[in-house]
Image (spheres, rainbow, N blue to C red):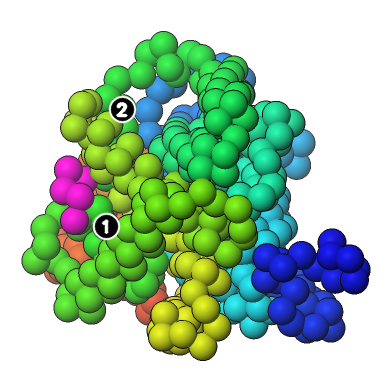
Amino acid sequence: MTAGGGPPPDDFTAAASPASHRAGTIACWTIAGLSLALNICRAASRSITHDEALGYQMFIAGSWRRPFAYAGAPNHVLFHAVAKVTTAALGVSEFTLRLPTLAAAAVFYVAAIRVVTRIADRPALRVTGFAVLVLNPYTLDFCSVARGYGLMLAFIFAALAVLPFAAGEPLSARRATAAGALLGLAIASVQIAVFVAAGMIAASFVAEQRAGRPATAIATAAIMAVATAMTAAALLAVQLMHARANDYYVGTGDAWLATAGTVRAAWAHASPYISSAGALSRSDVAAATAAAAIATAIIGRAVWVFASTRLTGRREPAAAWFGLMLAVMAIASWAVHSMTGVPYPQGRTALYWVPLWTVAFIASMTSAAPGSAVRVLGWVVLVALLVNDLARLRTTSYADWPYDAADRQMVARIAADHGGSPERVTIGGSWQFEPALNFYRQTRALSWLKPVERRPPRPGDDYYLFTAEEAALVDVLDLDTLLVDRHTGTVLAKSRRRASAAGVR
């Protein structure tokens, strides 16, 4: 505080009136509440997806040993352990399976409000930035779907919330320990978060060094690293002993495709898993190029700030801190790919890039002088992102598994067509539907439905489910169409043999 009782000269968050700050805070909490309500509705009403059902069958149903014994991309250890508790206590349904993610979404929003409040210098920037952060359709997907990515985001932002970004504020051992433990939990949620942990530890170390506290820098970085490793190892010990590079196969070997695919999911809410540059539209390429250019500018400015001067204020260090974090995350991804062949993160395995890029962008806007060309351009980008987020906000399906949107409806239609007959029937079709169909067969006690096999479509089944891409097989296999989902194009059909038998009955 100054002698007159006002804020210190470098406290740029004090530029607006207290009433404006209160209004901004209320607006952020309102957005968070509405977003959480939307997530709850999706969790209760959306069909189970391929990966959710597969996770339930492989790691949640059965022995308590399962979540901890299997190494690989499908197993999100912490999530599966918590979901095992919620489903055991409340029964198995889409909603109870997704409860851990909903709790994580609440933590994510609370932590994000704290982070954005600390890095945004005006209430308008705080509210708009927070809205862009939490309303991104791809980020929203993983705030309700039953996978570990929501937990990962919650713990990453909780770690950010306890770390100081200002050079004038030392990083204490207590904060370093808390941040490290939270990062360890993020890694236990999805192991790909190890890149984020590396970025945060490195940024904290360099910030302490450049603030003239070398002893603190070494001690707190070591504390963070040890707390991260110990927390993660406590939950992942069995996995780490048996893990192999090819266990982690979600992603791509092309850094540009990894970037473009992830930006495509965040910008267009479309599948990020593309195998060639030819699959990208012009708008995909433009969005990916712009996002990469902005990230490069943020990183470049961070390097310049840390290299050019000792840091004592608050305006530059927050932007530089986040920029350095992004740089280390990118370098760590490249190094692991080069040394082990593990693919570059893409889509959901690169999900953390979307909100972290956003907070880095908000911090960079704050570091620019009000009214400057950089600040004006930043506002143009931020508003464009918010408008696009709202325009792309679709809650009927998840970008990674759009074909599963109507699964619950399709199963109900099959049950109605079957009519309670004791005759056991089979379902064939696109392999993507196998886990979800078996989930409903098991959890709804559909004894008349034989276990669904993961195999190519073939004649002889009673019912068929096809993705929109394989809908032509209805004619190839000479089937009768029962239902076509208008949102996804998923097709439910049945054999003419069964249709004839139903006519006889």
Q: Which mark is residue 292?
A: none
Query: Seen in the image, is 3 located left or right of residue 72?
Result: right
Image location of residue 29, percent across then percent down: 75, 71
Q: Residue furthest front?
A: 3
- Please check the rendered image and state whether residue 373 is part of the magenta-colored stretch, yes or no: no
The residue depicted at 51 percent of the width and 43 percent of the height is 210
Image location of residue 72, percent across then percent down: 37, 28
Q: Nearer the viewer, residue 380 or 300?
A: 300
Image location of residue 467, percent across then percent down: 28, 62
Residue type at mark 2: give it: Asp
Q: Which residues are magenta?
A: 252-256
Is residue 380 visible to the viewer in this orientation of the structure? yes
Position of 176 relative to 39 (above/below): above
Q: Which residue is mark 2?
A: 247
Q: Nearer the viewer, residue 441 or 380?
A: 380
Residue type at mark 1: give it: Thr
